[in-house]
Image (tube, grey):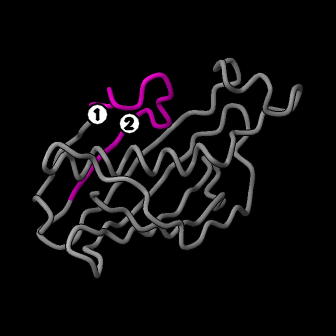
């Protein structure tokens, strides 16, 4: 069962030094949680300098990491363990996130078929509303 949450959350200490989202909101009930995360693409972030010099593009793997950080924060620890990515079922990039864009990541977490698994479907949009990525990922507690 998923814990009921209807609050703003933001302890990302597990993610240091890479915080892939700036803000996270989680809402839900016993069977489904919905995440809304945002991240502003800052061209002066240390990891951006080499990701296409002169043409800043937010690394696609950071979208996946943003989803990971949001899910970990929403689900929390169980038996002293955090949930982790078990399987990336699909990941489709359709538009770049450029310097100054704000990424909005919306995700739905549902109980998976396994005892400690969760299925997550997510969509990532740019500030202009264009879909930048779509993801389907399975998370699990070890």
How would you rate the neighbour count of disc 2 (Cα within 10 Å): few for under 14, some for 14-19, many for 20 or more? some
Instruction: Return the disc, 1 or 2, that comes first in the chain's sequence.
Output: 1
Q: Quadrant of the C terminus?
A: bottom left
Badge nearest the viewer, 1 or 2: 1
Residue 131 lies, in percent from the top left, at 63, 62
Find numbered disc 1 in the image and state the secondary structure of the residue it sits on: loop
| Residue 126 falls within the magenta-colored stretch | no
Quarter of the image where the N terminus is located: bottom left
> Does residue 136 appear to the left or right of 53 in the view shown?
left
Disc 2 on helix, strand or loop?
strand
Span colored in magenta: 10-27
Whether the magenta-drawn stretch holds residue 19 is answered as yes
**Residue, far right:** 54
- Outermost residue on the front side: it is 142
Rendered image: mark on residue 117: none
- Asked where in the image residue 121 lies, by quadrant, the reply is bottom left
Mark 1–mark 2 distance (CA, rounded to whole Å): 7 Å
Q: Say whether residue 96 is left or right of residue 14.
A: right
Q: What residue is drawn where x is 47% and y is 30%?
A: 19
Residue at 51% over, 37% down: 39
Vertical position of residue 17 compared to residue 118: above or below: above
Q: Position of residue 78 (x, y in %)?
A: 15, 51
User: Which residue: 62% across, 33% down?
Assistant: 41
Q: What x and y, as percent, mark residue 21?
A: 46, 37
Number of the label disc, if any, that sits on residue 23: 2
Q: Position of residue 30 (x, y in %)?
A: 11, 69
Q: Is residue 122 above or below residue 15?
A: below
Q: Which residue is mark 1?
A: 10
Tell me how many marks there are: 2
- Verify CB contact (< 8 Å) between mark 1 and mark 2: yes
């Amino acid at each position: 069962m998923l814990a009921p949450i209807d609050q703003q959350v933001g302890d990302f200490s597990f993610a240091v030094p890479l915080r892939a989202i700036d803000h996270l909101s989680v809402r839900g009930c016993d069977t489904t949680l919905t995440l809304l995360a945002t991240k502003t693409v800052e061209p002066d972030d240390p990891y951006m300098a080499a990701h296409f010099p002169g043409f800043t593009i937010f690394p696609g793997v950071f979208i996946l990491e943003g989803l990971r950080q949001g899910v970990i924060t929403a689900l929390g620890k169980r038996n002293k363990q955090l949930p982790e990515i078990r399987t990336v079922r699909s990941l489709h990039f359709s538009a770049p996130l450029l310097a100054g864009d704000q990424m909005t990541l919306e995700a739905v977490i549902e109980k998976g078929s396994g005892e400690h698994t969760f299925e997550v479907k997510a969509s990532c949009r740019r500030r202009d509303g264009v879909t930048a990525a779509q993801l389907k990922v399975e998370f699990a507690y070890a």
